[in-house]
Amino acid sequence: MTDHVSPDAIRTLFSHAMSEMYRAEVPQYGALIELVRDVNGATLAADPALKARLDAAGELERLDVERHGAIRLGTARELGQIRAMFGVMGMYPVGYYDLSVAGIPVHSTAFRPIEQAALQRNPFRVFTSLLRLDLIEDRALAAEAEDILSRRQIVTDRALALIELAESQGGLTELQAQEFVAQALETFRWHSEATVSRATYDKLVKAHRLIADVVSFKGPHINHLTPRTLDIDRAQSEMPKRGIAPKAVIEGPPRRKVDILLRQTSFKALDEPVEFQGEHGSHTARFGEIEQRGVALTPTGRALYDAALAQLREQAAAPGAESYSALLDAGFGCLPDDLETLRAEGLAFFRYRAGDVAAPARAENVSDLIASGALVADPQVYEDFLPVSAAGIFQSNLNSEDQSNYRAAANQDAFEAALGAKVADEMALYAEIESNSLTRALNQLGQ
Ligand code: OOG
Ligand code: NI
């Protein structure tokens, strides 16, 4: 069937529609988008080498459309429906994140494109959390929450019908895709009318603000949309000048010559008026965030990162500790700060392509080919999330007294049962892109 639009095109339609909706709902998001556009423009203008590298690697086009969002779901049924909806847009569950260790009663995955070409078209991702009522001590309250959630339907009937159609006919036509996107958008809209009374809401907030956020509304409002900046330090320091108050520290690794993984910062949720079955009140759920993405680390590289981060957090918590930013700058020396060493030591993932130079006759190995310019290794962008950073983002936008101590209890099996599928292993995805690209490039070079 040739009259079907590609899942990539549907995802792009959807991410634009979400961005427009969020801009209308949260005006500061519009200011943030402008800030990031300005910072990215200035960064590229000041660093022609960076611009040329991004351009050659096919990374420049995706920059302006690049976003991630986040939602929080209440039930297994909802997670299954969301999985089907994102599937129509070529977004699949990747990775498992246990947030209970950070005192947040959810576990999560990221729905995102998985193939290189799809990532390059539009890497739109949605961090999707499922509430874990099993972790709530007050069983009566958990049962009440479950009962409230069982009565809502977060996907419109028409969206469900179009998802089924896409699955049975193997895609959607242009017109169907447009209708699907408009219908899908309804799921993520903000509803200022709660489905519960003020008293019930207050009870839920007391158990955990996050439970109230998931349970009290008609659907899983998108709680932030995050553009990608090329210079998060500059964006962070520009924010106050544009009337935006960011959280104190940037999550993730420090500023380095070679960006690794993901650095993120957010600004506070809005306090929004809510109608609780006739009573006025308010709720804080939605916020803004920006991120800077660097190279994806291999399991070996990631283990070094995780160990350094754990040590840093321990040091920062000690009495009389140096400032977090001083510790941060000093704390990641275990990871080399140049691309070729990261590559040669197997610490980061790359994507290979043939360069403009013919392969030398006596190239012994990949490093020789790279040194000669015959082979080029582009760093693979980290397409996923970081659990410690995610916890920091959650917490800065919930009240700090809401950090309960749950029995640390990752339960990927339960999550996958709710999802109705296994989550993909992100490391395997990066490794596959790396090895496929190397095989192709070596073939091309006649090696
Ligand atoms: C999700 C927080 C995690 C990120 O960028 O790490 C996240 C949430 O608050 O629902 O979006
Ligand atoms: Ni986020």
Image (cartoon, rainbow, N blue to C red):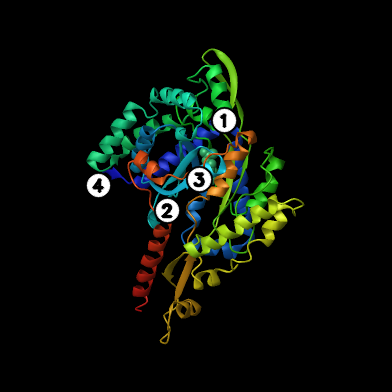
Q: Is residue 222 above or below residue 446?
A: above
Which of discs 4 and 1 lies nearer the camera? The answer is 1
Under 8 Å from ligand 2: the CB of mark 4? no
- Pointer 4: what residue? 2
Which dot marks residue 67? 3
Mark 1–mark 2 Cα distance, whole angstroms, equals 34 Å
- Kind of residue indicated by mark 1: Arg
Amino acid on which disc 3 is placed: Arg
Of tags 4 and 3, the one toward the viewer is 3
Residue drawn 36% across the image and 27% down it: 156
Task: Determine if residue 247 is in view.
Answer: yes
- Where is the C terminus found, in terms of image quarters? bottom left
Q: Which residue is mark 2?
A: 119
Query: In terms of sequence position, does the residue under pointer 4 or pointer 3 come before the other?
Result: 4
Q: Front-most of 148 and 283?
A: 148
Q: CA distance from mark 3 to mark 1?
A: 26 Å
Mark 1 or 2 closer to N-term?
2
Q: What is the CA distance from the residue labelled 4 to the residue labelled 3? A: 29 Å
